[in-house]
Image (cartoon, rainbow, N blue to C red):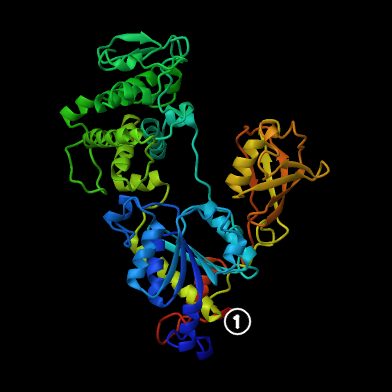
Amino acid sequence: MGTEQEINYREPTFSQRIANSKVFVIGAGGIGCELLKNLALTGFKKISVIDLDTIDISNLNRQFLFRKKHVGKSKAEVASEAVKQIAPDVDITFFHDSIMDERFDVDFFRQFSLVMNALDNKAARSHVNRLCLVAGVPLIESGSAGYLGQVAVILKGRTECYDCTPKPNQKTYASCTIRNTPTEMIHCVVWAKSLFNQLFGESDPDDDVSPETVTSDGMGDQKNSQTMDNDGTTTNGSVISADNGNSSANDAITKNGKMSTRQFAEATDYGPKQIFEKLFFDDINYLLSMADLWKERKKPTPIHFMQIIDEGLGGSRPNEDENEHWGVSKWAELFEDSLFALAERYRGAVKEKRMLIWDKDDEPAMQFVAACANLRAYIFGIGTKPLFDLKAKAGNIIPAIATTNACVAGMIVVEALKIVSGKILVDQEPSAPFPKCYVCSGKGEVIVHVNLNEMLLRTFRQNVLVGALNMLKPDVMDLCQNHRILLSSEEGETDSILDRSLGLLGVLNGTQLECDDYAQQLNFKLILFNDNTLTGEQFKKVEEQATKGAKSISDDKQKRDNEIDEEEGVPVKKAKILCES
């Protein structure tokens, strides 16, 4: 690399440029803590940081700026105080707020030399990407997953933006599979997480984990079905619990005749043994009574709590290594212990008029979900998994690793120094902006398939515009109906038609909609096509793959192999200047 391309960190004028640069860090979690420390020690003097979260005890093992005394306090505030202790001359401002708040608009972003993302969700990343593009401020995007991490610079008109390439959506599963016929461990994990919410969190009565045992007429889903208790006696259409029906839970029936999982738990004072018997014996026997389910499937095997504990079913109690396969008796014990802990916490939360929120880094919550998932997997012959493996599945991400976050934060600062120097050096041509990107191309189109006769305007706004396209305050006009306003960001203007179907509002197959978001200064055309195979909640977004400016990974690897220095045996990197001030 030539001397003119080098970044001389020790050169006085460059150090001054670093000190004068005003930077904005979004997120003060795993990557954010490391990044703030790095920026302060590198010489950045003007730092702003925003984070909506408060510190949880589960954060302390990898977010090193926080201590036990800080639990419950604002991450942004505590991180700022810690940075001041590391570098007292740093002028740092914190915001304990959501980056989606309207006060953090384009004008707010324009005050910064560069913005650095340390976020963990797609919606916020997409929002920041759009504001930086409009403001013309360089954005450094980052992320980590286990031992993998990535950092990318986003420059308007020079590189692809965050929205140029489609991001994978979280996989969903049919509720009937989750409740009745799981075949994979992930089905059991989803069931266990839903159970947590049914017992301790914000629950949805229509998403109860148990099969309906009682209906409005006092009978079961199948009035002629037979359910057997542990003594071999049967009852029509309802489940006899292991205590022969003497529990007060039998009286906890809703007005429509159906007992919810939470009502059962409250009626038994969250007794672990009673809840265990309901979930893993009574409910399983009820499923077995539905003969049609098991014509071509392996039948599940109900289990009793005391039988497992007394017989040590599934092996003896192992050590506490989270990577080890534990016997089912261990999972039963863990179910009991974690349920006790969560029930006690839940009682305190109820007094404060709040619910518990599941977090994969909350030890009792994670142990409860892992225990329930493994017990259900054992019953359905799926096979159990170690706690560490289930942590990844339950969190839907690979567990965070502090060292990876530290490496990513270091890479962010390296890219920041390149931007400050005015020379962004890369060893290969970056991917160019996607010409049809609905965010950065200025002339983008989005094609979506929905059931026009079933999807409500409210659902279209929430699921498609806000959920999938990450809009904040959408305004929509129907170009095929003389620019009729379908949705307005002005409060109350279109509320009267939100619960009408798109078809009733005159939206036809192939209708073109003009979509605007003033908060993001976003404008694009959306074309709707009808698909009667979809439900009123479903949609399909047609993804057009971006043409990559860079060569494929395999081609790049071959190129690197060809550039191996024969004498030294190491790759010779040929730096390119992406832009120069």
Q: Is residue 308 left or right of residue 179?
A: left
Give the residue type that dot 1 points to.
Answer: Ser
Q: Is residue 118 above or below residue 203?
A: below
Q: Residues within 10 Å of mark 1 (few under 14, many from 20)?
A: few
Q: Is residue 512 left or right of residue 421?
A: right
Outermost residue to the right = 482
x%, y% of residue 72? 34, 50
Q: Is residue 264 above or below residue 332?
A: above
Q: Is residue 325 above or below residue 29?
A: above
Q: Is residue 267 above or below residue 69?
A: above
Quarter of the figure that contains the C terminus: bottom right
x%, y% of residue 7? 48, 84
Of 361 and 317, which appears nearest the observer? 361
**Number of numbered markers:** 1
Dividing the picture into quadrants, the one containing residue 139 is: bottom right
Q: Residue at x 50, y 39 (%)?
A: 172
Disc 1 target residue: 581
Q: Residue at x 35, y 26 (%)?
A: 300
Describe the element under mark 1 as helix, strand or loop. loop
Of 432 and 140, which appears nearest the observer? 140
x%, y% of residue 434? 65, 62
Q: Residue at x 37, y 62 (%)?
A: 79
